Amino acid sequence: MTTPDRSLSVSDAMLLAKGALEGIRIKVVGEVSEATIKPGYKAIYFSLKDAASVMPCLMWRDAYDAAGVRIADGQLVEVTGYFTAYAAKGRLQFQVRSVAAAGEGVLRLQVAELARRLEAEGLMDAGRKRALPLFPRAIGLVTSPRGKAVHDVIRTLARRYPFAELVIAGVQVEGDGAVAAIAGGIEALGRVPGVDVVIVGRGGGSYEDLMPFNAEAVARAIVACPVPVVTGIGHEPDTSIADMVADVRASTPTAAAETVAPERGDVARRLDSQERLLGRALSHVVRDAGHRLALVAARDVMQEPSVLLAGRLQALDLAAGSLRAALPERLSRQDETVGRAGEALARRGPLLTGRHEERVADIADRFLSAGGSLLEDAERLAATAAARLEDLSPLAILGRGYAVCYEEGGAVVRSYAQASSGQRVRVRLGDGHLGCIVEDTGPED
């Protein structure tokens, strides 16, 4: 220990400070700035900063290479180490022992948690995933309209499968708003008639750049899409949640285009093979049908049609003979029956006729006696109706002193308002009519 009374050299003072600082090990999170990473240097130099302070740092090259992280200005990192003093310059600096991307570590944990939750729902099950169409009519593509991926897909489809229509949903694929844009593009292409498969793709980038494809909204849009979805996101090592839930995962956008589109040479070879198989199958069917036709033509019934009808024709002949033998005998018996019935009727005819005449005479007497009473009732009803009709007759009403006034055109004047002073009218009485001129009009007093 030193005391305030003892004076130290500058070197001793710096060594004292260096020893005190190096005993404190801490973790620091900050944004990289002023990074200097030059070949041949034994250490790399950079600063960590936040809103209020800047901290100079160094890290030995072997420790930096072992960390597997490549730092760059603007990157958020978490470093572990201790403060030290560089005596030759009298400068305080932080010596880094390990470094990790701070943001990426947190993001990876969040993505892993979401992946576990979606997997528990069954969204990543192989049984849920759909087979791709062999010959798609139209292919949808969700990607940036300005990125390299769109050109790779167009070029690949033009080379392999130029027969399909390509429908592109150009969307934002990174930054704020990218998640909603990608999910909306997938939903929009799923509603386009004729689109049989959708590619979701973008070129490579950092883990943070690919984060929109780890979003739950994008994953659910892929699952809800009515047609199969193929992903081609980033490069071969990159795997996102969108890749996990997609029906097929390809390593790159180019590989995704090759997955959905058969190579036209393969299509031609497949068609040739199908043509040969179809020809052989058709020849086999024709040969089989010809053989069966020959067997049918060789049957007796085809050579001599009477073989099929011989038994029925004989039965018909026997039935005709039996009918010819039975018909005269049956007619003879019926003639005898009719004769006997005629004789019986002749014997009983007069008796039946007398009885019927008595009944007819009795019915006629009853009808004549009832007819008189029916006529009397009818006459009474007619008289009553005539009297009622007479009471309702307009002529009878006129006969009691009433009159009807008509205009010159023949319309009945029902109100004083229909007539005016000086107007000619005709008045109908019970026994004639009067021609009149109206002098004045007015309501009833």
Image (spheres, grey):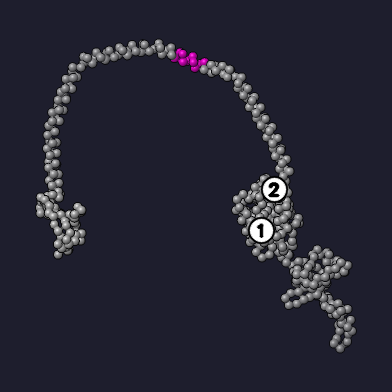
Q: Residues within 10 Å of mark 1 (few under 14, many from 20)?
A: some
| Residue 366 figure quarter | top left
Kind of element beneath mark 1: strand
- Asked if labels 1 and 2 touch by Cβ distance under 8 angstroms, the answer is no
68 on left or right of 352: right
Residue at x 82% of width, y 76% of height = 93
Q: Choose the circle earlier in sequence order: 2 or 1.
A: 2
394 on left or right of 295: left
Q: Residue furthest bottom?
A: 5
Residue at x 36% of width, y 11% of height = 329
Q: What kind of secondary structure does the magenta stretch mostly adopt?
A: helix
Relative height, residue 176 to residue 120 (above, below): below
Q: Position of residue 231 (x, y in %)?
A: 69, 54
Q: Position of residue 188 (x, y in %)?
A: 61, 56
Q: Which residues are magenta?
A: 310-319
Residue 1 seen anywhere in this rendered image of the structure: yes
Image quadrant in which the N terminus is located: bottom right
Amino acid at pointer 1 = Gly
- The residue wearing badge 2 is 162
